[in-house]
Image: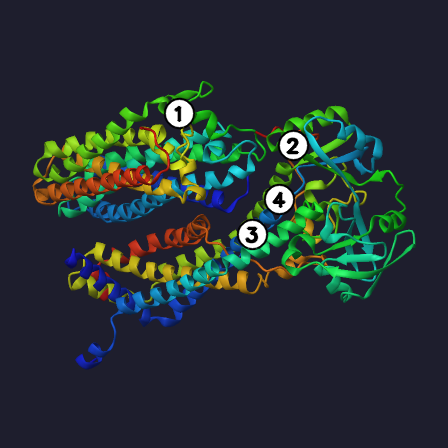
Amino acid sequence: MIFHPSILALLGSSWLATAVLLASAVFAMRLLASWDRASGSERQIRLERATILVSTAVGLVLALEAASLILFVFNADRMSALFVGAMCAVGTLNASVYGFATLYAKIAVFFASALWLVLDRVDGEGRDFPLIRLKYAALLAVAPIVALEAGLETAYFLDLKADTITSCCGKLFEDGPQSSGAGGELAALEPRPALWLLFGGAAVVVLGGLVAGRSRVFQIAQGVFGGAMFVVGLAAIVSVVSLYVYEQPHHHCPFCLLKREYDHFGFALYLPLFLGAAAALASGMLGVVPRRASLAVAQPAIAARLARLSALGFALFALACLWVIWRSNLLLFG
Amino acid sequence: MTSASLASRPRGSTLAALSTCGLVLALGALIAAALLARPATEARRESGRALARELGLTDPALFGEARYTRHPSQADLASAFQDAPTGLDHFPAGSLVAAPRGFGTGHIGGGEE
Amino acid sequence: MGARFERQRHLLDFAVASLARRPAKNLGLTLVYALVVFLLGSVMLFGSAIRREAGVMLADAPEIVAQSMVMGRHDLATGADLEALKGLRGIRRVEPRLWGYLWDSAGAANYTVMVPSPSDAAHALASGEAIVGEGVARARKLAVGKPFFLVSPAGKFLRTRIKAILPQASALVSSDLVLVAEADFRSFFAIPADRYTDFAIEVANPREVSTIAEKASVRLPTYRFVTRADMHRTLEALFSWREGLALALLAASLLAFVILAFDKASGLSAEERREIGILKAIGWETSDVIRMKLWEGTAISGTAFLAGLLAAWVHVFFFSAGLFEPVLKGWSTLWPRFPLSPEVDALEIATLALLTVVPYTAAVVVPIWKTAVTDPDAVMR
């Protein structure tokens, strides 16, 4: 294991989150078993009080998890100096079998937390705990993901050893014959269709986000398209946007973008993309969730606001892509 | 408390915002100073780098007590107790400088891409 | 938007007023908090600054250093091996180097005595001349033109005159250096003519460093080859390890602080309880009280974090981490006086925040909730 402040901070926050969520999950089971809004019993009052603590604590740790996703990638990039052959975060993540698994788990936690937080927020708008069962059932689903993430992260950092020989991003994301895996396939995507997909998809989700306030169907559609756009956006970054950033026709790495050499430009792409996707998914979720009387006004309003937020996120993402293509010295199309 | 004293006293949020702004500004001033001093810093580092290049220096000259603290990257690999029998560590810097590890095979430092 | 903002603003007003009603307690907590941030922040800023500084200065270290090994210890390299290395394809130049350590009882310090490369015109020395590092000059009170004597372990004298003192800017890598002419070095340490300390190898194509080191180790199996990448990883590991160790030690103080914060947050005075009770009696909701209390925490955290970071910055970059110096120096009499230059690193600041603000928040959440759910009639009675 490598003794490093950022690693200590990441592990500490992951285990804190796990502890909070496991405790909350135990509480959730109790709540699901004995929640009775009509009852005025001592136990019901205790449960109602405890929900406030759970909402506050889980809200705080899930926000922490979102921050730790950024820190994790940033730290992986920084640690690449310690590994033979690593040039960016890819090398660090590849230095152990748990590396990419941890990253994916962290992304899953990010989206799960965003959705849960929205659910919690909406529930708080109604006076009669309208979504309480759904919320705590969902918490039971989120807790294992967070625990899994903490476990993977711990395994990853324990497994990391300085001087491990690892592979550089060139091996994973090069469109040459030596590339391997999904990264290579994404990289092999032709630039022209990738650009069409990127800007076509962005136009759909931006427009969709603006009109989603009109009906639940639009909100659900925004959720579906937003999720798809997230995948399209990542694919487009690998296959074509990265080329414009590096101004090299064959370097496809989606992680080198985050480096200082490229002005941390990756953050301008990923932050709005993740924000847009999370907001779109949340809006879709609110479209699906059955409407209770006490939320007749709040739920559609929040869903519409989230959809607009997702439109903003995707629009910023598309603008960042456009800007880098316009500014780049690389000409892919004559 | 009279209404006059209420009106003359700034709101708590204003005070909080002001003190935060003050601290952020002070921090910003330090950062700005660092950015302004950058050319001088670069020049200083460049002169150190040039000297290290000319003389072929390999390690920082921080701890001069022992060979393995003065030149950690050049220290003996295999000679335990190199400075005294059973002498695991007898310099305070030994708690700060780990024995060199991870040179791989001991012949060359693994492959370099 | 406006209404919601106003609402939060009023909550913040309340939070500040509530903090101000107990100035001693909250000021004390903020000070301790800031002190924790200051300590952790100083360690982190100092660690990364020195790592960066050394990393830049040693960026052009020799591509490969070849050391002769006998029974696991360094031995002198021979002229025959030099010729053997020179014949290898891919090697542009092999520079035989002469350097060693000398315990100087007058300065009570170890020097690194070194012969500058013949290709290095800036430090060319005639016999009887010496160039010394800033630390040596300080320890022996030397100035340019002054005489400088060294006594070898065999009792032999070396009489030199100071030709120059290496600039302070490079002290981090050169503080303990004594540069002398080759003839002086050989006679002083009694090194025969075709023996060297080690070889610095320059390769034609930097991408082939590892291949060449491998080929060379086949040619000279008793040699150890240290590549530039090895040196950089050693440097990186050295400082990261040191920094992690210091932080682990500070974890104890962090824990103490967390307990203090928890204690302060849960031990409410009767007066505070009454306040909460009154607020709830006049219609505040539990969630409002929690939000107000969270604002209090935010105000304390924000102030303490910024103040601590500010103090750490000033400590490290304006006072060269003076508080750590006795610890770091150890027995090192030639501790270099080197300036550290700040660089803004978001990862570092984020890590520092994670290491300090998160534990504090975790410590106060449960007490805040306990306070907020108290029944008004239970406390007003």
Please tell me how crowded label 4 is: few (under 14), some (14-19), or many (20+) other residues with Cα within 10 Å: many
- Residue A9 at x, y percent in the picture: 46, 46
Distance from Cα at disc 4 to Cα at disc 3: 12 Å
Please tell me how crowded label 2 is: few (under 14), some (14-19), or many (20+) other residues with Cα within 10 Å: some
As shown in the figure, which amino acid type bears the numbered disc 1?
Answer: Gly
Secondary structure category for the residue under label 3: helix
Asked whether the residues under marks 1 and 4 belong to the same chain, the reply is no
Answer with left or right where residue C65 lies relative to residue A61: right
As shown in the figure, which amino acid type bears the numbered disc 2?
Answer: Ala
Image point 30% across, 55% down: which residue? C370
Distance from Cα at disc 1 to Cα at disc 4: 33 Å
- Residue A113 at x, y percent in the picture: 29, 39
Asked whether the residues under marks 3 and 1 belong to the same chain, the reply is no
The answer to which of marks 4 and 3 sits earlier in the sequence is 3
Residue that carries the numbered disc 4 in the rendered image: C235
Q: Of the numbered discs in the image, which one, if any, rests on residue A183? A: 1
4 and 3 marks in contact (CB < 8 Å): no
Which of pointers 4 and 3 indicates the residue nearer the eye?
4
Q: Where does the C terminus of chain C fall, quadrant-wise?
A: bottom left
Q: Chain of mark 4?
A: C
Asked whether the residues under marks 4 and 3 belong to the same chain, the reply is yes
- Residue C177 at x, y percent in the picture: 74, 54
Using the image as rendered, state which of residue A250 and residue B103 is in the foreground: A250
Secondary structure category for the residue under label 2: loop
Name the residue at the right extreme.
C155
